[in-house]
Amino acid sequence: MVSLWHKLLVFQKRSINIDKKTNTHRKNIIIFILLAALTIGTSFLYIFSRTYAKAWRIGVAMSPIAFESILARTLPHLYGMIASAIMLALLSVVFQTITQSRVLTPSMIGFDSVFVGTQTVLVFMFGTSHILFANPYVNYTVTASIMIIISMAMFGFILRSSRNNLVFLLMFGIILSGVIGSGTRYLQIIMNESDFIQVAAATSVNINNMNVNIINMAIPLMAIVAILIFWSHKKYNVMSLGPDHAKGLGIDYEKEITKNLIIISIGMSITTALIGSLTFLGLLAVNAAREIFKTHKHITIFIGSSIMAAFAIVLGQSIMELLEGAVPVTAIIDFVGSAYIFYLILKGNKI
């Protein structure tokens, strides 16, 4: 009789756990659908803000031919924004898993400085008419390759010799950015005026000045990186437990660190060269996803943070277009992100 009662209790507990998991799964799916619907809605809002809303402001009628012409220029920007936002969110999750910290993203390590420095050196050494600078595909390939090499050297040295020393990692990135920035400014001062104007135009990469020539090249590369990340979501679940537990569960931790550093370097180089620096977008999206979904499963965090990052950047850019660029969306993201990281640091100190 006692044995039967014990079996009934065990069965009841298992049933409750299954019901909880089922309810959580349904809740996550509903949130995913809602976020996806909002992102699609904001995409249409972005298209409207650049077509009919702009025509209405200047008091002209939007003809079908004009709409198609503007749409042809708008869609590449929209695709680039969404792809870059998803990439930043995925890479931020992976980077936080590697560093065991919720306040770091790979954008903080100075990819934008390396990008500007690389373009400046190419112009200073070869000139603006050289194929390394003039051809967008060759320039993109060379720039991304140099960024990958530099970031790999930096990440590999720091995380191997001083693993989990997050302060040293951040300080090294800031110092590297400062050194490269100083050298870049010096070269820009001593080069001739026409070369400087060309460099300034090429390095002023942002959402409005996106390098649409390389979108067809960048997005497939981003898709490959995203597939590799999603494919390893179960390994990230184990790695989030820490090096000791991960090794005990059969994960080759050092090998996975090296592989993911390569993935992060490639993804960040592609994204920075396409859309510029969005330091805090990944941080905000990832931490918002963790708060909403309350899970350590990376597949859920990957999907949730990706959709939220895409929604945030498209909504912000749509509002900026409607307000005629009164406040750049990157400035808003950086302001909110810096305030949020300050909150996370204070919260961590209290704990």
Image: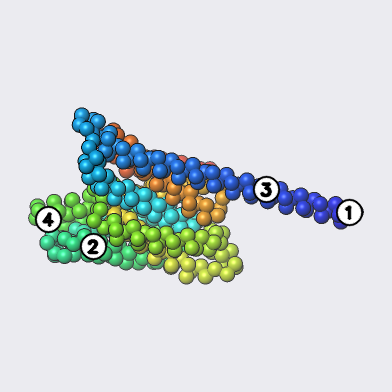
**Which amino acid type is marked by label 2?**
Tyr
On the image, numbered disc 1 is attached to which residue? Answer: 2
Residue 111: percent from left, percent from top: 31, 56
Task: State which tag comes first along the sequence, 4 or 3.
Answer: 3
Residue 184, given in percent of the width and then of the height, sits at: 21, 56
Q: Which residue is mark 4?
A: 195
Above/below status of 340 relative to 172: above
Q: Position of residue 209 (x, y in %)?
A: 24, 48
Q: Quadrant of the C terminus?
A: top right
Q: Disc 1 on helix, strand or loop?
A: helix
Give the structural element (helix, strand or loop) at label 3: helix
Q: Is residue 247 left or right of residue 190?
A: right
Question: At x 46% / y 54%, what residue is drawn?
Answer: 93
Three-letter amino acid code at the position of disc 1: Val
Q: Quadrant of residue 223?
A: bottom left
- For the residue carrying disc 2, how many other residues have a C-alpha within 10 Å: few (<14), some (14-19), or many (20+)? some
Sequence order check, earlier mark of 3 and 2: 3
Res 175 seen here: no
User: Residue 40 appears in which quarter of the rendering?
Assistant: top left
